[in-house]
Amino acid sequence: GESVGLHLPTLSVQEGDNSIINCAYSNSASDYFIWYKQESGKGPQFIIDIRSNMDKRQGQRVTVLLNKTVKHLSLQIAATQPGDSAVYFCAEKAVYNTDKLIFGTGTRLQVFP
Amino acid sequence: DTEVTQTPKHLVMGMTNKKSLKCEQHMGHRAMYWYKQKAKKPPELMFVYSYEKLSINESVPSRFSPECPNSSLLNLHLHALQPEDSALYLCASKLRTDLSYEQYFGPGTRLTVT
């Protein structure tokens, strides 16, 4: 069978609170970033993306912030709901290949009532 | 049609079997991907097809053989797999332009090798 491996970082929030999921990237030349949500037993689902010429981008209940100075990306979810419980992955487009995304390790979001 | 479909949803195979995974999209996307995902890990890129030609092979063992019969279909042929190949296999697609990087994923095939 599979090994247990490392535990995913987990963020636990109460329903209705705001959630902030963080991601660091290493290549200062990276110019495109994307967030995916993966529910148990499903494939990753696109949430929001941002290009490096922007600092902030908003979607429905989600906001992505990009801080190029410290190479940091965050996903903010407003009024977190039980349906937001999932693993969230950030990814950056590879600088050397526009067809390739480099995924972060993921964060599990748990929403409790 | 705005989704990527994958069949089968689950597959159990022995180490001597030959099986295939299938992926289909009708969004007009011209780049298609195979990823492998182990539990609690991010997706790991295996292959990329761009305009039906293999453009990226991430040093995947030859027991995995991809095929892109046309712009809508992507197959992954499996032969002589090992138990450690058990994983979720994800297909994804992308609109092939220089300005589009967002990949759309299918639901995956859960593969168990016994």
Image (cartoon, coloured by chain):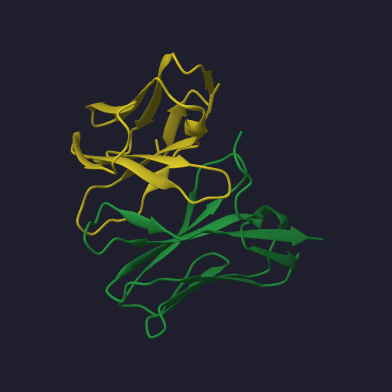
Above or below, A52 against B22 in this view is: below
Residue at the far top: name it. Answer: B17
Can you give x and y, in whole percent of width and height, for residue A66 in the image? 42, 77
Can you give x and y, in whole percent of width and height, for residue B93 in the image? 34, 42
Q: Which chain is green?
A: A
Quick check: can you spot residue B90?
Answer: yes
Can you give x and y, in whole percent of width and height, for residue A45 in the image? 49, 49
Above or below, A94 against A45 in this view is: below
Name which residue lies at 47% across and 18% down: B15
Total marks shown come to 0
Name which residue lies at 44% across and 29% down: B6
Q: Colour of chain B?
A: yellow
Residue B67: name its quadrant. top left
Quick check: can you spot residue B109?
Answer: no
Residue B27: name its quadrant. top left
Image quarter (top left, top right, bottom left or bottom right) of the N terminus of chain B: top left
Q: In the displayed structure, does residue A86 sit left or right of residue A13?
A: left
Image quarter (top left, top right, bottom left or bottom right) of the C terminus of chain B: top right
Residue A76: name its quadrant. bottom right
Can you give x and y, in whole percent of width and height, for residue A6 in the image? 60, 55
Above or below, A78 against B105 in this view is: below
Q: Foreground residue, A103 or B95?
A: A103
Q: In the displayed structure, does residue B4 sit left or right of residue A74?
A: left
